[in-house]
Amino acid sequence: MRAIVQEKYGSTDQLHLRDLPEPTPGAGKVRVRVRAAGVDQGTVHLMTGLPLLMRPAVGFGGPRQPTPGFALAGVVDAVGEGVTSFSPGDEVVGTGRGTCAELSIAGADRLVAKPGGLSFEEAAALPVSGVTALEGVKEVGRAAAGQRVLVIGASGGVGCYAVQVAKALETEVTGVASAAKLDLVRDLGADHVIDYAAGELAETTRDIGPFDLILAIGGNRSVRSLRRLLTPRGTLLIVGGDSRGRLLSGLQRPLGAALLSPLVGHRMPFFIASDKAAPLQSLLGLVHRGLVRPVIDEVFELGDAAKAIRYLVEGHARGKVIVRVD
């Protein structure tokens, strides 16, 4: 099978298209013939091997999983022992290992049936980023009707879903993004949009806040400055890390916030989204009701997967970046 492979950590220059043996699904696993794969910041972290803190789990000298990618949509090709929920020929969406390849192995509990109304590219845009937004806004952030929600990085892979989920919960949403992407954020339903370069958020949101929930997906604003924008019992969720430092690569902000949380009035939990089927099924329910839609910026062919990831790293993406595998 054809697959994107990297032998050592580094930039997109380490990614090459190779022929690999076909993987065999073990017990409880499913082999999926990938039709489309989504790329996200998790893909970037495993490509670079940063933060260093994660290397005991993913490989010290190089990645144990040499093919990047988590999100997938495709067709079941074979099933392992004990799998009764899927059969060859079923169209599925979910998360797997090394999805920038013609074949990927996924746990049966990480997959759901692909809705017939979605293309493979649209379906592949939902796992990981969409689920992160859903759990961040609804489950961890506890957003409720009438509350005020601030999404920083509202035009990216997670942010574009966070805006939609927050609106589905009948909140008042303010989205922060670059000036060139504000039209997209407004189109997704945001009640207010702010250019991130327009000035300090304390000033630009003076007549909009304070906020019951802040999702800080982009930028590196300090926890102190973000807390000033919250209501006395508001919640701050810092989703992911930036590129500063090799040991933690920006995770010091969400970790620091979580440690501070018990000592102050604000909730600031450390948050990692689930890759199980249940939250993805819930997200698809919102899609079916027309409350959330996949947002795709660019679609790259498998041989151009390095370009797709580079496009994401350089901050160009308006929504999701997809790798098509035919």
Image (cartoon, helix red, strand yellow):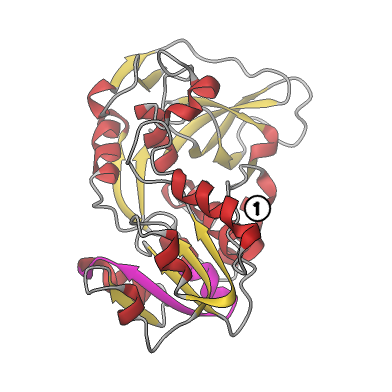
Q: Classify residue 123 as left or right of residue 194.
A: right
Asked if residue 175 lies in the magenta stretch, the reply is yes
Q: Residue furthest bottom?
A: 207
Q: Position of residue 27 (x, y in %)?
A: 73, 20
Q: Residue furthest top?
A: 21
> Would you say residue 40 is visible in this rendering?
no
Of the 4 image quadrants, the one containing the N terminus is top left
Q: Position of residue 113 (x, y in %)?
A: 63, 46
Residue 119 or 100: which is nearer the viewer?
A: 100
Query: Which residue was labeled with disc 1?
Result: 279
Say which residue appears at 55% left-offset and 23% top-offset: 57
Q: Classify residue 281 as left or right of residue 241.
A: right
Q: Classify residue 101 as left or right of residue 24.
A: left
- Residue 36 picture quarter: top left
Asked if residue 86 lies in the magenta stretch, the reply is no
Say which residue appears at 30% left-offset and 46% top-offset: 299
Of the 4 image quadrants, the one containing the C terminus is top left
> Would you say residue 86 is visible in this rendering?
yes
The correct choice, above or below, for 256 with respect to 174 in the image is above
The correct choice, above or below, for 127 with respect to 160 in the image is above
Residue 78 or 270: which is nearer the viewer?
A: 270
> What stretch of residues is rendered in magenta?
163-179
Residue at disc 1, secondary structure: helix
Q: Classify residue 124 as left or right of residue 287.
A: left
Q: Tell me the kind of residue under disc 1.
A: Pro
Say which residue appears at 26% left-offset and 29% top-offset: 12
Q: Position of residue 30 (x, y in %)?
A: 64, 27
**How many residues crowd mark 1 within 10 Å: few (<14), some (14–19), many (20+)?**
some
> How many callouts does the rendering have?
1
